[in-house]
Image: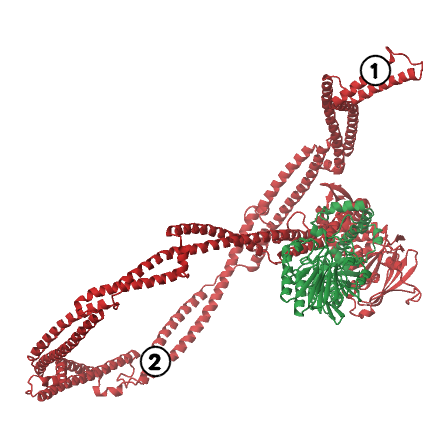
């Protein structure tokens, strides 16, 4: 019974609870079924059930009874889920029996029943203590992991042992926790932690790393986006100042510009006012001259020029009128010809056509005669007169049908020829096939040969392999001999007989010696330092002393003590009157005075040179200290040398015990490493030898089979015998096989070709018959036309075609003859029409009837052309005559008008004759110019200044043009300067304004701050899970070490026993060794060889895993009550021997608690019965 | 006559603790304190009021970005265009603050003097507003006695930033008490500083309007301003929510829930009541999972699983947008550690190791320090300002170690 106290202060008595009966009342396929585990004394129960017997349900029932039926149970396929019931009868630590029933549901589903009645009894409550006893304080997962084992888990466990290569801590921990892959769990924890934070990198995938990056990035953004209030104020101040400066410059510029405008105005108006005064005076001089129109002079000149021109025009017109009258009088014109001009033109135009017609009629007549001759000859050849051609010629429809018959007949005849040629070729080929009948090789014999050949080839290149193996063997043997020689050992057996020291033992010795060496080295170093330092300090002290008397605090203290002592003596002698005071040499007072002086002197010296005193003191103190330390160091060195000697002695003794050579620790470690290498080399040598033997045996066997197969197909095997001639045999068999295969392939090909040609022959025959039928049909159609086309009855299609062509030619010739006759008649009618027109025209003109029409026409046309030409001349002369008369009339009128205009001009100028007009016009023009200039000047003044004349004259008072100009220049220079200043001030204002306006109400900084908060939140959120995972990793690693340290010895011992049982003594025990600084598990074979787990087979690794699990559970028994070990088909892949051994081990384990082994392999029962007696085993059948 | 009373705007102070995990409705959250002030001004303009009272802490003390001030000015200009006056006092956060000092405010805003309590009369409304700004950050004396006497015939309002006679979570500033306030004879006291809305007294009406926008998980519930109507001497006051993000705490019991899928349903059921009437807002929720459940082992094996499940469940909520601020695990493990420590197997070894470590804080701290390095101590202030696990805190470290043990056990069981 086990007792513990919970955090709430309750005390539980956890006791063992042995399952006596499993009551499968309504569960899975079971109804009121009982498995009685108390029917015998044994604790090992084999529960047998064939497939579908409910083995898995029974297994689940054992777990569900203790931990409850899960919400999603697969065992409600017969009994409804709310009626599922499992019961169990248990025996507690006091031997008392208790009955429990478990139902499916929520809350309290476990009840106790009365053992006497078998009915639920409310007076028997299920206490926490009882529940704990049932579950062993585990949850379902833990229970299944630790106490449940099936084949797959066993295999996985074995695999992990192989992969972990025997790392002891992992193996023990995994076996104890019932878990798999501690290494993977550690790596998983580490990897998961790194997803949250990776201390060595800026990995974006790690949450905290990424958050840190974001935080920094946003901090940077914040820094850039933020504007401090003081910065803003500085910007605002800058802007205000720039604004004010700009306003000042603007004001000054405005004043300058105003003055500059005024000066410009004055400078402009000053000469204008001067000119104004001059023009007024000039106008006064022309007061008597009238204003004449501005164009008076031009008008006068124009009128005078016009008068001269008009007089010339009157003369020209009169001369032209005279010339026209003379030309008209000499013209001669025929009016009758002009009246019939168009008829005469038409007649003349037809002359050429009439001549051409006469020529054509004569040419046409010759051609007509030739055509008529050809037609007569052709008709005679065919045998019909030309008038009979119509009934012989086929119509258009008939012609189409006839052409089709002819066309089809040609094609079908050609096709028939082709088919007949193919039929002949096929016939010939078939005859050749039947004449050739090849002989085929024996098929079964060659099949056996091929099989033997495959086996032989499967061995690969045997000769090369053997040669390589042989070379490898020689090399390994040589290496082995070298290794043994290096180690100084005679044989491998002797090497195996040596038991090496553990690495930690070597390391410990080495460490101890190294520690001593280190200590000696340290002490010697110190000793050397002291020696050097002591010399230096002594030299320093001597230097102090050489510089003069050294007064220190100590000497001063001593001097004062002496003084005080003498003072005391004086007091005693002179004040207290003690007589016992011995009088020193000299009087007490003198001595005291001397001492007093000395003390004061020393005090003064000490004050004067305190630094030297301090140095001297320090020097003395260090010398003293070092002198004290030197003997300690000497003693320490002696002690260390003694310790080193003892360790060396112990080491030699240990080496002698172990049979090892006398070597130093490092050399021994190396020697042991060489020893392991040698053993490994020996293993490799054995393996290589075994492989060589195997190759040898296999090659012999294969060669024998191959020789037999060659003989069976009647072939003599190649020279060289079975053993050495395998490659030749393989080659011979391969060639034979290949030729047989090719022969069979060719035969197959020939048969296929024959079959194809026969099919083709049938096909061609069918085509020939079809073509001949078509041919006959069209020949019948053509036969009807022979008589109509005046052909013999059996004329071939070619003759029909020729006749049709002859008829076509004849038809075309007749048509051409008709066309020629028609054309001749048309030309004659043209000639006749022309002659009748000439006769009619001669009548109209009163001319005699013409003899030759063409000559008459030509003469008439010449006369007509002459009359037309003279009529044109007459019309032109009449138009010229009218134009000259009109011109004369216009000139006379203009003469009068100009004369009147000149008279008017004289009157306006106030003179009598036109001779004085130019002078008067000159004076009037000058007066007008002066007046206009005055008006323009006034206008310019008005434009130059808005001010009145009076105001301007006032402004100019006292100023001359030079003074105005000078001031104006000064003003302009000032403006230029101010404008430059204005540009700068404006730029400054704009710059400062923009800087100020750039700061708006944006929230960029706030957003960056928010993003920082968010990144910080992410960081914070990740911290706890990260720390949790890291601590979990550290906890697991630490627990692993601690568990190994604590459980290593008992677990390895216990597992050793089980493993020995399971391997039937092949492995004597398990041992823990150190390899590369790590503890590993090895198995000691019966022959003394230590096998690492990585060298074990899978089956042995599985056994080792099972042994470790049993050992872990055995260890657990010491603290916890028993729960049954439930094994589900764990022996499924074990052979009978291995299964027997494991059963034996399980029986041993069952001595300390129940073991339930479920299986569906019946032969296991027989094995178990054969191996174990009835006391150790109970068998249950489902 | 109508006016709004708001306080503790803390413009541009960030919302704390919101990790932007995948699926978090990030787009809804943009400078929430600004959005809340915009809502306040929208409300003042949309349903016009005569004036607005701001009872201190317009800015956050540590925040010195002038853009914030310009934003506040923009909002005040909006009110100015509508002729709405604003009366404000400065509190401990913005007293003598650089932003307050430098920012030129439009004419409609009056900030009360920090040297002496003064009165502003609005004659057309017969309203007198009395107030005084904090002269510096720490004001330890009671300012109320120096407030002017009420103006007879006027509706008298006192504008004051105070911790009253002490409020949890708030530093003591300008302390005073109900009797002093009542004795002053004012009709309405518009108080600021305390971030949780509180009606201190009905007659006279003394109100803490609370802040406009909650900024972290300890400022839960609706946040906004008071709208006060005075008709014929009768005062009617109404709370108007202005917050953009609403913070809440939610406890979800996972008793009897053993599947992750069922967590979604449990979360949604627990959340539904909190969403009634506030579905248009973004909710920042701190979830605490309680109860005894097998999911404890799930979470132990893969820390963060339950948080991710709750975050996913939040995305399934269609009625409103939910941001899971934090998921706190307060689940009870079925494991009996005392019993486990008695076992002689690997699990027992682990339990005893943990027991041994937690028995001595110093050795536990040293051991944890070697496993964790300085990650928990070397953090930027933004991170360490919040709740982080601390090695020098015994309870914290013990809890971490027990969590780590649970993780190991869960992974062993899964292996």
Outermost residue to the top: A585
- Say whether mark 2 and mark 1 are on the same chain: yes
Chain of the residue where label 1 is placed in the rendered structure: A
Alpha carbons under labels 1 and 2: distance apart: 176 Å
Q: Nearer the viewer, mark 1 or mark 2?
A: 1
For numbered disc 1, what is the local secondary structure? Answer: helix
Chain ID for label 2? Answer: A
Residue A938 placement (x, y as % from top left): 35, 62
Q: Where is residue A1045 in the image (x, y as percent from the top left)?
A: 79, 44
Classify A1114 as above or below B292. Answer: above
Q: Look at the picture and state if A896 lies above or below A661.
A: below
Check contact, mark 1 vs mark 2: CB within 8 A.
no
**Foreground residue, B238 or A419?**
B238
**Element assignment for label 2:** helix
Task: For label 1, count other residues whose C-alpha is less than 10 Å away and answer few (under 14), some (14-19) or many (20+).
Answer: some
**Relative image position of residue A372 (x, y in whole percent):** 17, 83
Determine the colour of chain A: red
Q: Which residue is drawn at 75% across and 38% down?
A: A504
**In the figure, residue A817 lies in which quadrant?**
bottom left
Q: The green chain is which one?
A: B
Q: Residue A409 at what x, y percent from top left?
A: 34, 78
Q: Residue at x 92, y 59 (%)?
A: A96
Query: What residue is pinned by disc 2?
Result: A404
Residue B339 appears in the picture as rendered: yes
Mark 2 Cα shell of 10 Å, populated few (<14), some (14-19), many (≥20): some
Is A556 placed left or right of A444 in the picture?
A: right
Which quarter of the picture shows residue A360?
bottom left
Residue A593 bears which disc, if any?
1
């Amino acid at each position: 019974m086990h007792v513990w106290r919970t955090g709430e202060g309750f005390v539980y008595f956890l006791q063992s609870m042995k399952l006596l009966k499993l009551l499968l009342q309504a569960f899975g396929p079971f109804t009121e079924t009982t498995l009685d585990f108390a029917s015998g004394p044994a604790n090992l129960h084999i529960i047998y059930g064939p497939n579908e017997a409910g083995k898995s349900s029974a297994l689940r029932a054992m777990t569900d009874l203790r931990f409850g039926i899960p919400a999603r149970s697969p065992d409600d396929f017969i009994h409804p889920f709310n009626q599922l019931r499992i019961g169990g009868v248990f025996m507690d630590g006091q031997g008392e029996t208790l009955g429990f029933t478990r139902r499916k549901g929520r809350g309290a589903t476990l009840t106790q029943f009365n053992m006497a009645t078998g009915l639920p009894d409310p007076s028997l409550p299920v206490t926490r203590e009882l529940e704990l006893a049932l579950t062993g304080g585990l949850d379902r997962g833990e229970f299944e992991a630790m106490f449940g084992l099936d084949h797959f888990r066993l295999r996985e466990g074995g695999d992990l042992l192989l992969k972990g290569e025997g790392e002891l801590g992992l193996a023990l921990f995994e076996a104890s926790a019932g878990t798999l892959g501690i290494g993977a769990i550690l790596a998983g924890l580490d990897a998961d932690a790194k997803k949250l934070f990776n201390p060595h990198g800026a990995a974006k995938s790690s949450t905290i790393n990424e958050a840190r990056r974001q935080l920094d990035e946003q901090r940077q953004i914040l820094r850039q986006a933020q504007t401090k209030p003081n910065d803003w104020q500085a910007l605002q101040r800058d802007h205000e100042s720039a604004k004010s400066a700009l306003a000042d410059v603007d004001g000054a510029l405005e004043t300058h510009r105003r003055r500059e405008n005024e000066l410009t105005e004055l400078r402009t108006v000053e000469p204008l006012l001067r000119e104004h005064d001059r023009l007024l005076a000039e106008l006064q001089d022309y007061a008597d001259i009238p204003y004449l129109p501005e164009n008076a002079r031009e008008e006068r000149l124009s009128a005078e020029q016009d008068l001269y021109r008009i007089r010339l025009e009157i003369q020209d017109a009169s001369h032209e009128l005279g010339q026209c009258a003379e030309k008209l009088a000499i013209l001669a014109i025929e009016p009758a010809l002009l009246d019939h001009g168009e008829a005469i033109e038409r007649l003349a135009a037809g002359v050429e056509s009439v001549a051409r017609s006469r020529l054509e009629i004569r040419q046409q007549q010759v051609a007509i005669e030739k055509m008529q001759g050809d037609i007569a000859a052709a008709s005679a050849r065919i045998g019909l007169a030309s008038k009979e051609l119509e009934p012989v010629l086929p119509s258009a429809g008939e012609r189409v049908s006839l052409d089709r018959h002819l066309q089809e007949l040609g094609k079908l005849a050609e096709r028939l020829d082709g088919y007949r040629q193919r039929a002949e070729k096929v016939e010939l080929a078939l005859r050749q096939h039947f004449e050739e009948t090849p002989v085929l090789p024996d098929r079964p014999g060659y099949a056996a040969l091929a099989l033997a050949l495959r086996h032989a080839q499967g061995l690969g290149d045997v000769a090369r392999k053997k040669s390589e193996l042989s070379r490898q063997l020689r090399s390994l043997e040589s290496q082995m001999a070298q290794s043994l020689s290096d180690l100084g050992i005679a044989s491998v057996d002797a090497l195996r007989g040596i038991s090496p020291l553990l690495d930690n033992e070597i390391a410990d010795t080495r460490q101890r010696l190294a520690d001593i060496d280190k200590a000696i080295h340290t002490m010697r170093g110190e000793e050397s330092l002291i020696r050097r330092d002591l010399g230096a300090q002594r030299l320093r002290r001597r230097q102090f002393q050489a510089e003069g008397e050294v007064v220190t605090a100590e000497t001063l203290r001593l001097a004062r003590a002496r003084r005080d002592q003498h003072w005391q003596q004086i007091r005693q002698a002179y004040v207290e009157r003690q007589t016992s005071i011995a009088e020193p040499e000299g009087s007490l007072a003198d001595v005291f005075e001397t001492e007093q002086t000395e003390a004061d002197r020393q005090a003064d010296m000490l004050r004067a040179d305190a630094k030297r005193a301090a140095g001297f003191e320090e020097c003395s103190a260090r010398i003293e200290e070092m002198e004290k330390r030197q003997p300690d160091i000497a003693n320490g060195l002696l002690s260390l040398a003694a310790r080193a000697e003892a360790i060396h002695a112990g080491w030699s003794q240990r080496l002698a015990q172990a049979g090892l050579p006398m070597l130093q620790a490092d050399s021994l470690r190396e020697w042991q490493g060489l020893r392991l290498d040698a053993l490994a080399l020996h293993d490799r040598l054995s393996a290589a030898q075994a492989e060589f033997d195997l190759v040898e045996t296999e090659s012999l066997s294969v060669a024998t089979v191959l020789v037999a197969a060659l003989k069976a197909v009647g072939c003599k095997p190649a020279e060289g015998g079975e053993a050495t001639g395998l490659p030749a045999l393989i080659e011979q068999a391969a060639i034979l096989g290949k030729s047989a295969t090719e022969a069979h392939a060719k035969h197959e090909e020939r048969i296929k070709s024959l079959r194809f040609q026969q099919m083709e022959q049938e096909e061609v025959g069918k085509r020939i018959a079809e073509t001949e039928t078509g041919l006959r049909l069209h020949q019948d159609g053509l036969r009807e036309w022979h008589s109509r086309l005046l052909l013999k009855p059996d004329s071939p299609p070619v003759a029909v075609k020729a006749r049709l062509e002859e008829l076509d030619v004849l038809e075309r010739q007749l048509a051409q003859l008709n066309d020629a006759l028609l054309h001749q008649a048309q030309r004659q009618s043209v000639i006749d029409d022309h002659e009748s027109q000439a006769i009619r025209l001669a009548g109209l003109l009163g001319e005699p009837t013409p003899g030759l029409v063409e000559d008459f026409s030509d003469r008439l046309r010449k006369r007509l052309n002459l009359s037309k030409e003279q009529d044109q001349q007459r019309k032109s002369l009449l138009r010229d005559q009218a134009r000259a008369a009109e011109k004369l009339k216009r000139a006379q009128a203009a003469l009068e008008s100009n004369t009147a205009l000149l008279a008017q001009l004289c009157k306006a100028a106030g003179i009598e004759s036109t001779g004085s007009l130019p002078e008067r016009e000159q004076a009037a023009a000058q007066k007008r110019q002066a007046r206009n200039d005055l008006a323009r000047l006034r206008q310019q003044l008005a434009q130059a200044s808005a001010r009145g004349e009076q105001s301007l004259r006032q402004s100019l008072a006292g100023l001359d043009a030079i003074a105005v100009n000078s001031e104006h220049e000064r003003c302009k220079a000032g403006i230029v300067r101010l404008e430059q200043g204005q540009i700068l001030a404006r730029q400054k204002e704009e710059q400062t304004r923009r800087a100020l306006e750039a700061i708006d109400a944006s929230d960029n900084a706030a957003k960056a701050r928010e993003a920082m908060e968010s990144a910080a939140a992410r960081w914070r959120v990740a911290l706890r899970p990260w720390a949790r995972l890291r601590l979990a990793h550290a906890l697991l690693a630490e627990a692993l070490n601690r568990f190994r340290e604590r459980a290593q010895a008992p677990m390895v011992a216990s597992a050793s026993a089980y493993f020995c049982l399971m391997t039937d003594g092949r492995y004597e025990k398990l041992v823990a060794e150190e390899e590369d600084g790590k503890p590993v598990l090895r198995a000691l074979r019966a022959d003394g060889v230590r096998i690492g787990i990585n060298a074990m087979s899978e089956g042995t690794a599985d056994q080792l895993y099972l042994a470790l699990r049993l050992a872990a559970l055995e260890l657990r028994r010491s603290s916890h009550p028993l729960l049954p070990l439930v094994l589900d088909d764990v022996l499924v892949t074990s052979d009978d021997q291995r299964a027997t051994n494991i059963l034996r081990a399980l029986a041993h384990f069952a001595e300390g608690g129940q073991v339930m082994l479920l299986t569906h392999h019946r032969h296991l029962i027989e094995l178990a019965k054969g191996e174990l007696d009835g006391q150790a085993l109970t068998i249950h059948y489902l | 006559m109508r006016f709004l009373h708001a306080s503790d705007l803390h413009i541009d102070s960030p919302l704390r603790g919101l990790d932007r995990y995948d699926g978090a409705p990030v787009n809804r959250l943009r400078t929430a304190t600004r959005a809340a002030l915009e809502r306040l001004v929208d409300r003042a303009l949309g349903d016009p009021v005569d004036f607005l009272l701001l009872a201190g802490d317009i800015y956050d003390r540590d925040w010195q970005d002038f853009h914030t001030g310009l934003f506040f000015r923009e909002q005040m200009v909006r009110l100015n265009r509508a002729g709405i006056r604003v009366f404000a006092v400065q509190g401990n956060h913005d007293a003598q603050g650089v932003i307050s000092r430098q920012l030129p405010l439009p004419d409609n805003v009056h900030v009360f003097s920090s040297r002496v309590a003064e009165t502003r009369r609005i004659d057309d409304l017969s309203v007198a507003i009395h107030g005084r700004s904090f002269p510096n950050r720490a004001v330890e004396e009671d300012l109320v006695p120096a407030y002017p006497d009420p103006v007879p015939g006027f509706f008298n309002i006192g504008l004051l930033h105070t911790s009253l006679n002490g409020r949890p979570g708030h530093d003591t500033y300008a302390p005073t008490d109900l009797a002093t306030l009542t004795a002053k004879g004012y009709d309405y006291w518009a108080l600021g500083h305390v971030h949780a809305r509180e009606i201190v007294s009905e007659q006279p009406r003394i109100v803490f309007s609370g802040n406009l926008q909650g900024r972290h998980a300890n400022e839960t519930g609706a946040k906004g301003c008071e709208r006060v109507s005075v008709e014929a001497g009768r005062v009617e006051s109404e709370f108007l929510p202005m917050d953009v993000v609403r913070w809440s705490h939610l406890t979800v019991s996972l008793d009897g829930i053993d599947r992750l899928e069922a967590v979604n349903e449990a979360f949604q059921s627990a959340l539904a009541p909190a969403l009634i009437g506030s579905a248009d807002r973004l909710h920042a929720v701190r979830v605490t999972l309680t109860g005894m459940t097998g999911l404890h082992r799930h979470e132990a094996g893969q820390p963060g699983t339950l948080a991710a499940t709750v975050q996913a469940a939040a995305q399934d909520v269609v009625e409103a947008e939910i941001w899971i601020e934090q998921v706190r695990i307060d689940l009870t493990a079925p494991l009996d550690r005392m019993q486990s420590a008695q076992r002689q197997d690997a699990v027992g070894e682990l339990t005893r190791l943990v027991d041994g470590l937690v028995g001595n804080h110093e050795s536990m701290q040293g051991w944890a320090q070697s496993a964790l390095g300085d990650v928990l101590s070397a953090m930027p202030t933004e991170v360490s300002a919040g709740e982080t696990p601390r090695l020098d805190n015994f309870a914290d470290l013990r809890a971490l170690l027990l969590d780590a043990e649970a993780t190991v056990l869960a992974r062993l069981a899964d292996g």
